[in-house]
Image (tube, rainbow, N blue to C red):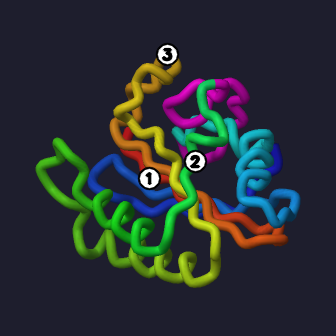
Amino acid sequence: MTQPERHLFSLWDYGWLDHTEIKLTPTNDPAQLIAAYLGSDAFGTSFVGPKLEDTPSIHGPFFRSSVAPDDFELIDSGTFFDRIKRIRHPDDFSESATDDQWAPVEELVSKLERQHSWLFNLRLTEDNSDRFHEWGFALTVFREFVLANPNSENVARLVFGYD
């Protein structure tokens, strides 16, 4: 797998935001974009470790085959920002990400939201353990967003995780 442009931001003690820029075939149909993403090499990585390893049967904590196009929800900007904001202090965490950790996340999220008109959120989270692969439980936080524009090959992916 060709390594896309990837940036990691540290959150909490073992948490992170993975911002990856990927290329997909341009389309003017949001459903086709998600279908292309699900069929791409970019979809099929564990997100564990410093490199995006090609793990064709899994995606994050999930079996790849258990994630369908309708698991991605097209959301508006307000919903996008609300869902991102809630990630700062996940349920069952004693502390939020610090201001120093969260400031670059807010800056990136604001910049990306302004640059993209399609904002998708994967409905599946760490609460969907029925779709986990054997060690999917290791990601105690998993939130994914895909940002794109009609007829553009450039796609931004944001994955928040804790392992």
Which residue position holds label 1?
Answer: 160
Q: Nearer the viewer, mark 1 or mark 2?
A: 2
Could you tell me what secondary structure mostly forms the magenta stretch?
Answer: loop
| Spatial CA span between label 2 and label 3 | 23 Å
Range drawn in magenta: 49-65
Q: Is residue 94 left or right of residue 129?
A: left
Secondary structure found at label 1: strand
Residue at the image position 72 percent from the left and 59 percent from the top: 30
Q: Earlier in the sequence, mark 1 or mark 2?
A: 2
Residue 122 magenta-highlighted: no
Residue most toward the left?
94
Q: Amino acid at mark 3?
A: Glu
Q: Amino acid at mark 1?
A: Phe
Q: Nearer the viewer, mark 2 or mark 3?
A: 2
Q: Residues within 10 Å of mark 1 (few under 14, many from 20)?
A: many
| Spatial CA span between label 3 and label 1 | 20 Å
Q: Earlier in the sequence, mark 3 or mark 1?
A: 3
Q: Quadrant of residue 46?
A: top right
Q: Quadrant of residue 53?
A: top right
- Dots 1, 2 in contact, CB < 8 A: no
Q: Amino acid at mark 2?
A: Phe
Which residue position holds label 3?
Answer: 134
Q: Earlier in the sequence, mark 2 or mark 3?
A: 2
Q: Quadrant of residue 92?
A: top left
Which residue position holds label 2?
Answer: 72
Residue at the image position 38 percent from the left and 38 percent from the top: 163
Residue 67 location in percent, x, y?
61, 33
Q: Is residue 95 left or right of residue 28?
A: left
Secondary structure found at label 2: strand
